[in-house]
Amino acid sequence: MKLATWNVNSLNVRLGHVLDWLQANPVDALCLQELKLPDEKFPHEALLAAGYHACWAGQKTYNGVAILSRTPLLDVQRNIPGYEDPQQRIIAATLHAPDGKPVRVISAYCPNGQAVGSDKYAYKLDWFQALRGWLDAEIGRHPDLAILGDYNVAPADEDVHDPAAWAGGILVSDPERQAFRDLLGLGLRDTFRLFDQPPRTFSWWDYRQMGFRRNAGLRIDHILATRDLAERCQECGVDKTPRAWDKPSDHAPVVATFGAA
């Protein structure tokens, strides 16, 4: 089973990229973030024609998440239960792996936070706390669970192209990294770090100052999996290919492969 995540930074702009990538990389499920379109504009017919069922939580101009799956999506949950939030950042569903076993998949677009100490930063930390509380319950119900998405957190200095320049700033501050570690404390594993990886492997590069060409990036897109699922993970990596396409997203897909139970 292959699971992938990709912040597409506008599905309307990059639907062609998504379809092309899926044709070349027929994953079992792809989690998308930053759809930037309302529910009624979601291109479900085009995706179904490509062989993918979908569930989504859209929002005009901002945010929005989706899960694309080769098998029907069941028990769909939009947003964090009990957490009032007009921003569409969570969609969860159960799908069946090729071996028939159910897997709970969550697509998450975590808040950016804007700047350390800002109101948006406080919202980010509060949102992560709510996410952790809900995930704790979800993991109890679903032994095989993966939460994929743009976390807007680079967990360690090795995930930052220039740690000194970024030190203490947004995406790398101690409270943000602690929020990420708190998720791992639930028993989740960062599948990327289960394997030896090439140094300076990132998933996001700023459009400005030739960030991608200079590989001046951050690893902020992650696939976390429960212990049982992580033990079956065979590989995880970043596919930088679409970042070099014409008019790309500033993020690249992250893909993890899991063996049968």
Image (cartoon, rainbow, N blue to C red):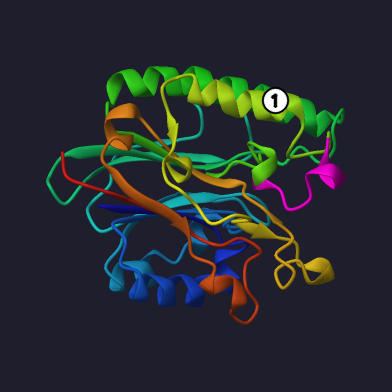
Q: Helix or strand or loop: what does disc 1 sit on?
A: helix
Q: Position of residue 247 (x, y in %)?
A: 65, 78
Label 1: how many Cα within 10 Å (few below 14, some 14–19, many 20+): some
> Depth check: 48 or 196 in front?
196
In the shown orientation, is residue 154 left or right of residue 22?
right
In the shown orientation, is residue 53 left or right of residue 89?
left
Tell me which residue sits at (49%, 65%) in the image.
239
Q: Is residue 27 visible?
A: yes
In the shown orientation, is residue 144 left or right of residue 88?
left
Establish if 173 lies above or below 239. Answer: above
User: The disc labelled 1 sits on which kind of residue?
Assistant: Leu
Magenta span includes 249: no
- Report the magenta residues as a range: 159-167
Tell me which residue sits at (57%, 25%) in the image.
181
Q: Quadrant of the C terminus?
A: top left
Q: Position of residue 60 (x, y in %)?
A: 64, 55
Q: Position of residue 142 (x, y in %)?
A: 28, 26
Q: Quadrant of residue 19?
A: bottom left
Tell me which residue sits at (43%, 18%) in the image.
136
**Which residue has dot 1 on it?**
125
> Depth check: 48 or 31 in front?
31
Establish if 100 lies above or below 81. Answer: below
Q: Quadrant of residue 7?
A: bottom right
The residue lying furthest to the bottom in this view is 246
Q: Position of residue 260 (x, y in %)?
A: 16, 44
Q: Quadrant of residue 47?
A: bottom left
Q: Is residue 84 visible?
A: no
Tell me which residue sits at (60%, 41%) in the image.
151
> Depth check: 79 or 141 in front?
141
> How many numbered marks, from 0 up?
1
